Amino acid sequence: MIDAEKWYEYQRDYQKYGLDMKPERVKPKTRKRRVIVRPDARNRAETRKMAISAVAILGVVCIFAIMVTAFCADLRYDINDQMRTNAELQGEIENLQAQLYSSTNIGVVESTAASTMGMVYPTKKKQIYITNADVPEEGFAAVLRDKAYN
């Protein structure tokens, strides 16, 4: 066997030349574990305050969204009610226009004048033709007004 002193000398000589006769140790691959840094008490309080304020802000935003949705629904109901009312009024207007056109029709006026007022068409002997000499200077409207109100 070799003395301990010679063994240390032998190792020192090999290290001088850089020869390493030992096989390298292969480290087994291990997964790196994440280190969770736990906050101290002060950071926990700040984190808790931030979380509570975030939840409060989110709650206020949700309540505001609900209020806006309710307001929009109320407006839509009012608009639909007004549109329904407008449609009814438009139908009444069309009915009144139809009655107006039917009552001002020349046939209706003629039959009403003949039956109610006893009016008849003039005969050839009773027809009068107006010439330019017969036209009054003030106009027919002025003559009719004078006769009606005097």
Image (cartoon, rainbow, N blue to C red):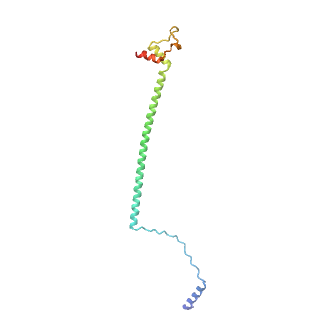
Q: Quadrant of the image for the N terminus?
A: bottom right
25 up-or-down from 129: above or below: below
Residue at image point 42% right, 48% down? 66
Q: Toward the viewer: 17 or 7?
A: 17
Residue 79 occupies which quadrant of the picture? top left
Where is residue 138 drawn, in percent x and y? 47, 17
Where is residue 19 drawn, in percent x and y? 61, 83
Residue at image point 55% right, 89% down? 8
Residue that lies at the very extreme toward the top in this rendered image: 125
User: Can I make out residue 130 in this image?
Assistant: no
Where is residue 2 drawn, in percent x and y? 57, 91
Q: Quadrant of the image for the C terminus?
A: top left
Residue at image point 43% right, 46% down? 69
Q: How many marks?
A: 0
Where is residue 15 drawn, in percent x and y? 58, 85
User: Can I make out residue 69 in this image?
Assistant: yes
Residue 78 occupies which quadrant of the picture? top left
34 up-or-down from 82: above or below: below
Q: Toward the viewer: 144 or 55?
A: 144
Residue at image point 43% right, 16% down? 146
Q: Does residue 124 appear to the left or right of 71 in the view shown?
A: right
88 up-or-down from 19: above or below: above
Q: Toward the viewer: 117 or 10?
A: 117
